[in-house]
Every structure is written in structure tokens, then in C-alpha cells.
């Protein structure tokens, strides 16, 4: 006779978002963990990752990233020092790039954020970096290359260049950039850029036109403006689509 669901052992997967343990094992050796703890469930993955940090280039990158983290959150010049976010991301990018000794930075940006990209690149150049920038429509290839039907285009019946994140990455690869920065690429386009970029990649800002490029606003307003994302309101999403 087959065992009931309650009698069989549940196969757990990582669900860190559901952890309510006050002193977690990932925070302290004396901590505890729920059954779905990723630290406990995936020891081989943790060990594999640890080995990667032993590689000299990754070790240096990770070291400087952690130093940058501390400098962003701890102001030790204050008397007494205090823990508080003290640096905007543009400053973090500049400081981290200097720590790494980068000279040439790549900026891959969305055409809808052209003005923002111009200011951002000027700031980087004013701080001594050589900057190579490339917009999403580089190459001017029509969306017909992606077999899009007319109703799947933004501009129906017209020439409409596709976003070309692979070309953006290859342009920066050819330019020999030390570090690449994303500004406003669409969901999916950013993924392809990261896949094809030879240099490490960071994100300055993501695109969210509806929320002023502040996607977390949908999370902060989950109980009000964004309640349509709740399980009992999902039909509203379907109607909107």
C-alpha cells in the first residue's frame, strides 16, 4: 500500500524568503535553521562557490565588493561612527571601479534614458574614467529579424529597430572595457547583455517606466496601489494584459 502524503518525506527546496528564524545559521554559527534553509539543503553548492572565491581574480573582486559594502553602510569618520546608508549608487560605482584599478568603463543604456545616460557618463568621465557607451538600438536591425508579427511591435507597420543587447555587449567587448554598467535595459535584454559581456557587469538602474524606474514601489504599495498582484486579485492582471 502506498504511503500517504503525510507519511512520505517531503522534498524541501530553498525558500529563504519564508525564514522567520531570529538567529539564523547563515548569520551566526550558533544559529538555527528551518527545514527549507538553503545553507543546509545545498552544501555541495556552497562548497563549490567557496572554491570559486579562491581564484585570484574572483577573490580580489569579492574582497573589494565587501570593502565597498562596509564603506557604504558604516561612516567611521563620524564621531561616534554609525551605521547608515551614506553613499548613492553612482558614488559606489566610482569608488569600486577605483578599488579595482579600472580605467575604461562601458555603459549599456536604453534609448529611453538617453539624457540620464549622458549625465551619468559625464560624471564617470569627470572622475577620470574613459567611457564607452552604447545604446540599445545599436545596429538598427529591424524587428523582422526576430519574426515579430505586426501586433507584437510597438510601432505597427513601420520600421522598428530591435533592442540589441548582444551587440551592446560585443561592442564593449571589442572596446576592451574593464567593467560594464547597465542603465535601464528591458527585462530579458539585460539578461542577454550579462550573458555575452566578457567584463563583469553591475547595474546602475533598471527600467520601470510605470514607477519612475523604482520597481520596489510595487512591493512597498502591495497593500494599497499594487494590491492587484495579490492572489485573489490576479484576474485584474489578466485584464490589464
Image: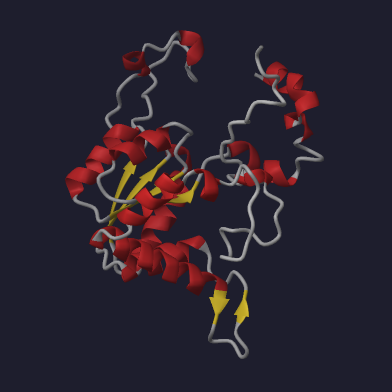
Q: How is the image coloured?
A: secondary structure
Residue 3, located in which quarter of the rendered image?
top right
Q: Quadrant of the N terminus?
A: top right
- Please state which of residues 232 and 39 is positioned toward the viewer in this rendering: 39
Q: Position of residue 111 (x, y in %)?
A: 42, 38
| Left or right of 63 in this view: 87 | right
Q: How many marks?
A: 0
* 2 shown above or below 175: above
Residue closest to the far bottom? 79
Residue 77 visible from this viewpoint: yes
* 184 shown above or below 7: below
- Please state which of residues 8 and 233 is positioned toward the viewer in this rendering: 8
- Please state which of residues 135 and 215 is positioned toward the viewer in this rendering: 215
Residue closest to the far front? 1
Residue 125 visible from this viewpoint: no
Q: Position of residue 15 (x, y in %)?
A: 61, 41
Residue 241, located in which quarter of the rendered image?
top right
Q: Position of residue 181 (x, y in %)?
A: 37, 51
- Please state which of residues 141 and 157 is positioned toward the viewer in this rendering: 141
Amino acid at each position: 500500500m502506498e504511503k500517504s502524503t503525510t507519511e512520505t518525506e517531503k522534498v524541501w527546496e530553498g525558500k529563504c524568503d519564508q525564514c522567520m528564524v531570529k538567529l539564523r545559521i547563515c548569520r551566526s554559527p550558533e544559529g538555527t535553521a528551518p527545514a527549507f534553509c538553503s545553507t543546509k539543503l545545498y552544501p555541495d553548492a556552497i562548497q563549490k562557490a567557496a572554491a570559486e572565491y579562491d581564484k585570484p581574480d574572483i577573490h580580489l573582486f569579492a574582497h573589494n565588493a565587501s570593502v565597498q559594502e562596509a564603506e557604504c553602510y558604516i561612516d567611521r569618520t563620524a564621531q561616534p561612527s554609525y551605521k547608515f546608508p551614506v553613499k548613492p549608487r553612482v558614488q559606489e560605482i566610482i569608488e569600486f571601479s577605483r578599488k579595482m584599478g579600472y580605467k575604461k568603463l562601458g555603459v549599456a543604456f536604453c534609448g529611453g534614458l538617453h539624457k540620464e545616460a549622458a549625465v551619468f557618463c559625464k560624471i564617470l568621465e569627470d572622475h577620470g574614467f574613459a567611457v564607452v557607451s552604447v545604446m540599445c538600438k545599436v545596429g538598427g536591425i529591424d524587428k523582422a529579424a526576430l519574426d515579430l508579427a505586426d501586433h507584437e511591435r510597438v510601432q505597427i507597420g513601420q520600421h522598428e529597430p530591435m533592442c540589441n543587447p548582444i551587440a551592446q555587449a560585443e561592442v564593449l567587448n571589442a572596446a576592451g572595457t574593464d567593467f560594464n554598467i547597465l542603465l535601464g535595459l528591458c527585462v530579458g535584454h539585460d539578461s542577454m547583455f550579462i550573458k555575452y559581456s566578457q567584463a563583469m557587469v553591475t547595474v546602475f538602474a533598471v527600467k520601470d517606466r510605470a514607477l519612475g524606474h523604482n520597481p520596489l514601489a510595487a512591493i512597498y504599495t502591495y497593500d494599497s496601489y499594487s494590491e492587484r498582484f495579490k492572489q485573489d486579485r490576479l484576474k485584474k492582471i489578466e485584464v490589464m494584459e
